[in-house]
Image (tube, helix red, strand yellow):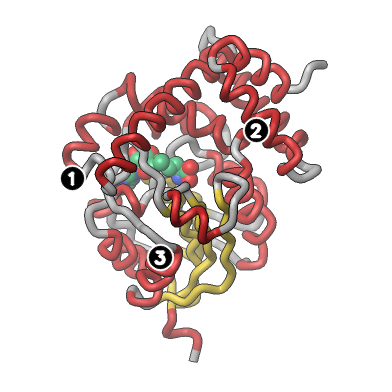
Amino acid sequence: MESIINRIIQLLRIKNPLAAKKLLNNLPYFDNRHNEFTQYYLGNYIRYLEHSGLTIDFGVNCYVKLLNDMMWQRAQFIESGRYCNDSFISVDRAVYDNKSVMEYHMHGLLLAQFLWPDQYQRFTFFYDHLRNYRPVKNYLEIGAGHGLYISAARELLTDAEQFDLVDVSATSLNLSKALLENKSIFFHHRDIFDFAPNYQYDFITIGEVIEHLEEPMKMLNRIMALLKDDGTVYLTTPVNAPMIDHIYLFSTIDEIRTLIGKSGFVIKEESTAISENIDYTKALELKIPIMYAAFIKKAIKQT
Ligand SMILES: C[S@@+](CC[C@H](N)C(=O)[O-])C[C@H]1O[C@@H](n2cnc3c(N)ncnc32)[C@H](O)[C@@H]1O
């Protein structure tokens, strides 16, 4: 049977030849589990598409739209040195609450997890290290988007009793609900600042969300309140990565580390990946996106 990656490359050759070439060039940078992960997670995604009367062709169209948006956003960013958006309310209206935009954006982002080496590294870092932070009884994901991370957590944390997913976007929530069918997850269509459970969590995942806020520190404060004292957070956020829904610009990795420290957390393990094959200094100079991911804990427990 033809691999999903090969099928995607074939479709990209027609729809966006440059993206097909880039993906082919990137293939050597994936590890030897990449095909297995892609077949499993994107295989599940393709089954969902087929159930909805669609095919992977739809997913690749969404991915191409995401790439086009990124190109435009990047041109603006390089010219102005800023992200285009400066308010959560306007992003909520234009993206999270706009079904057609949010749909292609989330489908495109799900494919990107397996097509971009930096995003794939963000996923495998989570996958390989999550179990080091057991026991986990209560698990929360904030802004799950396409639901890939909570899907993996549901499989890895076999002793966990409660999985909660909170997302402000109905489109995201519906996509993750459909992809996570029968996985005993509680879905909450809520802004995390309005979510008030009567218990705290052992583990919270928040991937690619704090850059969507005007003040990321407020999100870290919210997480501090939702997390048990000995709990762990998996946090990821990018540097210099303009997107249609990004507001807060981190210009260096040290800015993220400083924010984590100032919010009362300590970094236990971290991972970074540059989205192009260049070094960190060059990436900063050219404002090329850099992925940052970390497992963090409350500082109070470190004494
Ligand atoms: C870029 S997606 C991240 C998807 C996924 N977590 C990942 O790591 O790839 C951001 C998600 O965060 C959600 N989001 C943004 N602000 C939020 C908030 N204040 N409360 C809950 N969800 C939020 C958006 O609706 C969207 O689904």
Q: Which residue is mark 3?
A: 256
First-in-chain label (3 vs 1): 1
Q: Identify the residue shown where x is 61% and y is 33%.
A: 115
**Residue 6, visible in the rendered structure:** yes
Q: Dot 1 lies on which element?
A: loop
Ligand 1 in which quarter:
top left
Q: Identify the residue shown where x is 40% and y is 50%.
A: 240
How many numbered circles does the render carry?
A: 3
Position of 187 relative to 102 (above/below)? below
Among the 4 quarters of the image, the one containing residue 300: bottom left
Residue type highlighted by circle 3: Ile
First-in-chain label (3 vs 2): 2
Q: Residue furthest top?
A: 53
Residue 50 vs residue 303: left or right? right
Position of 275 relative to 5 (above/below)? below
**Location of residue 226 in the rendering, given as x and y in whole percent from the top left corner:** 36, 64
The residue nearer to you, when weighing 242 against 227, is 242
Q: CA distance from mark 2 to mark 1?
A: 33 Å
First-in-chain label (2 vs 1): 2
Q: Which residue is mark 1?
A: 87
Residue type highlighted by circle 1: Ser
Among the 4 quarters of the image, the one containing residue 106: top left
The residue nearer to you, when weighing 263 against 48, is 263
Mark 2 and mark 1 residues within 8 Å of each other at the beta carbon: no
Residue 11 vs residue 102: left or right? right
Q: Dot 3 lies on which element?
A: helix
Disc number for residue 41 = 2
